[in-house]
Amino acid sequence: MISEEELINRIAPKIEERIQYKIIKSIIHTLEEEFYPPEEMIRKEFIKAVKEAEKGNGIAFKDTDELHAYLESLAS
């Protein structure tokens, strides 16, 4: 039969490892929320930027050739 002390010596490292894992995972989650905004926030800001762009007199190009031709016309 295993003594109580041997059992503690076997189990303690596993418990410590699980606790460390949970702490590290919690820290990573907190940092991610701090540095990477939630998707909903990004979506709202994108929609806001598109609406602001629609207000202006922006130019839309069908393809890169049309853009290139426009840029060339500005150069001359």
Image (cartoon, rainbow, N blue to C red):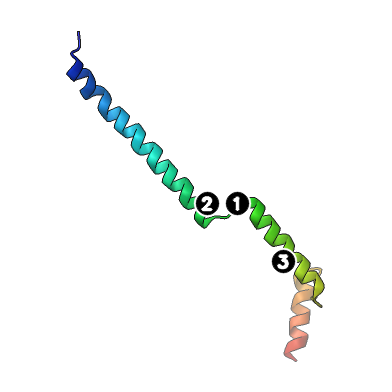
Residue 47: where, in percent of width, then height?
A: 74, 60
- Report which residue position mark 3 lands on: 49
Residue 41: where, in percent of width, then height?
A: 65, 55
Give the mark, 3 or 2, whose residue is nearer the N terminus.
2
Contact check, label 3 and label 1, Cβ < 8 Å: no
Residue located at (69% from left, 56% from top): 43
Residue 12: where, in percent of width, then height?
A: 26, 27
Contact check, label 2 and label 1, Cβ < 8 Å: yes
- Element at badge 3? helix
- Element at badge 1? loop
- Report which residue position mark 1 lands on: 38
Neighbor class of circle 2 (other Cα within 10 Å; few <14, some 14-19, many 20+) is few
Q: Which amino acid type is marked by label 1?
A: Pro
Residue located at (68% from left, 61% from top): 45
Q: Which amino acid type is marked by label 2?
A: Glu
Foreground residue among 10 and 64: 10
Residue located at (81% from left, 73% from top): 55
Give the mark, 2 or 1, whose residue is nearer the N terminus.
2
Neighbor class of circle 3 (other Cα within 10 Å; few <14, some 14-19, many 20+) is few
Inter-mark Cα distance, 3 to 2: 22 Å
Inter-mark Cα distance, 2 to 1: 7 Å
